[in-house]
Amino acid sequence: MKKISLLHLKENEKAKIAAIDSSHNLEKRLMHMGLYKGKEIAKLSHIGLRGPVVVKIGRSILALGHNVSSKIIVEK
Amino acid sequence: MLKKIFLIGNPNVGKSVVFSRLTGVQVISSNYPGTTVEITKGYLKLDKDKIEVVDLPGTYSLEPTSSAEEVAVSLLKESRKEESAVINIIDSTNLERNLLLTLQLIEEGFSVIVCMNMCDDAGHRGVHIDASKLEQLLNVPVIPTCAVTGSGIKLLIQRIKDAAPVSRSKLTHEDRWLEIGKIVEQVQRLEHRHHNLREILEDASVRHLTGLLMASGVIYAAFKFVRFIGEGIINNVTEPIFLNFYQSILGKMTAHWQEKGFWFHLLIGDLINGRIDFKQSLGVLTTAPYIEFGMVLPYVISFYFILSLLEDIGYLPRLAILLDNILHRLGLHGYAVIPVLLGFGCNVPGILSTRVLESKRERFIASTIISIGVPCVPLQAMIFGLLGKFGGFYVAGVYLVLFSLILILGIILNKTLTGYSPEFLLEIPPYRFPPLAMLGKKIYFRIKGFLIEALPVVLLGILFINILLYFKLFDFVTGIFAPIINGLFGLPKEAVVALAIGFLRKDVAVGMLMPLNLGASQLFIAATLLAISFPCVATFVVLAKELGIKSLIKATSIMVLISIIVGSLLHFIILR
């Protein structure tokens, strides 16, 4: 299993969340939106020039800012 | 004894639509998270009792992480549990995520009733939920509804009395998600289907290349449509009514008016070549209604038609994704695009909706940018009306100046203000197509709001101006500011009056420029200055309320400074 940040996951690839390397508040917010350790996600796209990453979790589509995405570690 | 009903749910599940259905109070609803930033109250009649219904801003959980969530949660927690019921509205197309809040509410001991909204849309997407099974597992009433059409609402009202606290052990978030997974497995059946056009478009609009292509297309088409519809109404409806019908009525009235004194000046204004000229006479019965109904209202209608359509379809959050990288450099994040777009209609709702942004710093930057660089529809309509005849070049010029100003101002504010910009985290709703009646209602609601707010100010404003003009009270003020206006900006000294009236209303202010017969370049400078300088008094009040006096003074100083710099620069570049 390889651990990388969400930024480095390729578009259209699936992975499992391994860790959220961030402040408690952000982790809590992500948790409330259904994004937590062990959850499977699919990366839809990454907008250039340090734009957000768009992911699909269950039936939701979430846009995560560049900074947020760099703190989400996934394994595939 | 039931006294209060709270509506609570995740952002963008249709709480406001359910609220309107229950209370009959019309509120704005859209297809993006954070439409409701204020708490709205209404009343529901239940077996002769009048029960207060409170529509709360959306929240993902009972542990708030943003200011809007905090408002919702604290209000709920302060209430007396034995006197209130909680209608938890959930989005059937996304059951799993919504159930976190549902379980929390039940665990906390509230009397919960679950309103499973958007059932029709779930069906279209191949999501089938067994409501009675869910009711059994949760042990609280579960009612499938479709609030936009109204189906299921009657049953929801009937079953409010069944809501009662049930015991459920408190879980940690991890365990709660596990529990939810088990529940969803038992009640939800997904039909496997191929992607349809809607899903393909949803997908394309969040990808880099296709997203940008779609965004350019949408923005271009939106602008074209606003102009097309606006011009269409002016040419085919308002202009004929004013010129063929209203003019002749007024003409008959004035023909019998012997002495053209004070009252004539007030109501009709000056006759141009012996005739009433709606653009130049400046009377309460002539120019005032012409500005509001003949020039501004058509664009208000067309703008809100297009904006409401984009809102309800759910396109705006997709625009937010694409603009996030640019807006980050201005100290904002993608979602700021919503307050900015609303600001193009009227700065007041734009600034109010900056509440969707989390930090004070972001709200300051967004509010300042809106009040300086974003012209409202009435102002834009007047700019089209006046500058348009000199060619699209000048109109585009005003937008270009304002757009550059937003960028420069944002970058400077971002560099100089302390603090940081919080993270961008946004749920992207699916595309939805609301019934036309809903869309029509929303547009009607907004136009009515515009007329109620604008009309008295315009009529009284023109009356007031006319009294001042009649007694030549403006001469004193124009005398003082003439050197600045004339020397720095290259405008005739009478333009002082227009700029001063910009504080009252921007459309009237541009209207005051009409009798001055300015050239294209002078009009261009005056219109740009009106857009940048002091916001109208309504915006000023909202700014003071939202930002506080200290920040208001800061924003105002920036405004005055920028107006002087931009006005002088434009004068220097164009007129010399």
Image (cartoon, coloured by chain):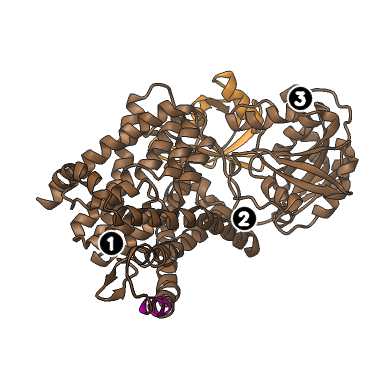
The span shown in magenta is B248-255
Q: Amino acid at mark 1?
A: Met
Gap between marks 2 and 3, in whole Å?
A: 33 Å
**Toward which corner of the image does residue B113 lie, by quadrant?**
top right
First in sequence: mark 2 vs mark 3: 3
Q: Identify the residue under disc 1.
A: B514
Determine the residue positioned at 33% across, 41% down: B406
Q: Evaluate whether label 2 is on the same chain as label 3.
A: yes
The color chain A is rendered in: orange
Disc 2 versus disc 1: nearer the observer:
1
- Residue B52 in the image: x percent, y percent? 77, 41
Task: Specify few, some or many for label 3: CA neighbours under 10 Å numbering under 14, 14-19, or 20 or more.
Answer: few
Residue B213, percent from left and from top? 41, 54
Task: Provide the secondary structure element on which disc 1 rests.
Answer: helix
**B63 displayed left or right of B347:** right
Answer yes or no: are tags 1 and 3 on the same subunit.
yes
